[in-house]
Image (cartoon, rainbow, N blue to C red):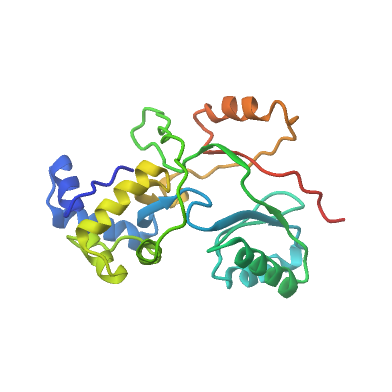
Amino acid sequence: RGLPLVEKPFAAIGRVLGESEARVLEMLARFAAAGTLSRVGVVFRPNAVGASTLAAMAVPAERLGEVALQVNTHPEVNHNYEREHRYNLWFVATAPAQDALHAALARIERETALPLLSLPLVEEYHIDLGFDLSGRGDKPCERSTPVSVGPLGPHERSLVAALQRGLPLVSRPFEAVGGRAGMSEAGVIETLERWLDQGIARRIGVVVRHRPLGYASNAMAVWDVPDGDVADFGARLARWPAVTMCSRRPRTLPAC
């Protein structure tokens, strides 16, 4: 987290580490090639730049691999994984707007001939997939509640599109991204700073794949909490060090 928003961020990181910019870039490229690093870039707050949902499907065991591949072909799907439950396939889908998201989910149901549950975010109590690598067990700090913002302008949407695959591992990544988005380097940096202040961007940094880092065990737990108690329950649960995501989702009756 906390990627320096300066013209040469990797040189700034190198100064902290006592390494050269070239060495920092070489290490990041090596981590990416090894699969430890997913990307260096922006993590957006859910629904800040479009619409998203968590979806679940109960897939017959003999069809799980086939259905997972079908789901993965949809560009709206950005996470897809198996869980130990009758609802054994869970994925996250995002789209520019709600109607596009609903259309994508309908296509997945039609192609797989299986119903799905859509569980969009209602309220978040803690969502931060930053991993503590200091060994101290520190919990990442939450940013302030986002202010109300209007729709993104054309240049901002172009910047979001240019950032989808992460920042290029070059000396001046914001200049390179700006070239793709039709913005100046200074304009990109200013926009990212504003997005962080507004809460549109949750963090900017290295996005890792947790299993290669040694985080081999994880679980997703669900409670049915009375409506009057859910905010307090969620806030208390979010304070546990091991909890990286805690949110309220709508109650949805499963298909028979």
In the shown orientation, is residue 77 left or right of residue 172?
Answer: right
Relative to 189, residue 223 above or below: above
Q: Is residue 252 above or below residue 75?
A: above
Q: Quadrant of residue 249?
A: top right
* Quadrant (top left, top right, bottom left, bottom right) of the C terminus: bottom right
> Residue 75, image x and y in percent?
54, 70
Furthest toward the right, the residue is 256
Judge left or right: residue 240 versus residue 18. right
| Residue in the foreground of this view, choosing between 20 and 142 | 142
- The answer to whether any part of residue 204 appears in the image is no
Q: Is residue 233 visible?
A: yes
Whether residue 160 is situated above or below residue 110 in the rendered picture: above
Q: Residue furthest front?
A: 150
Residue in the foreground of this view, choosing between 191 and 168: 191
Would you identify the image quadrant in which residue 62 lies?
Answer: bottom right
Quarter of the N terminus within the rendering: top left
* Residue 205 horizontal/vertical position (percent): 33, 48
**Front position in the image: 217 or 189:** 189
Percent x, y of residue 46: 52, 50
Residue 173 percent across, percent down from the top left? 23, 61
Q: Which residue shows up at 75% across the image and 62% down it? A: 59
Q: Residue at x 44, y 41 (%)?
A: 147
Q: Image quadrant of residue 55?
A: bottom right
Q: Residue at x 32, y 56 (%)?
A: 31
Task: State left or right for residue 2 relative to residue 10.
Answer: right
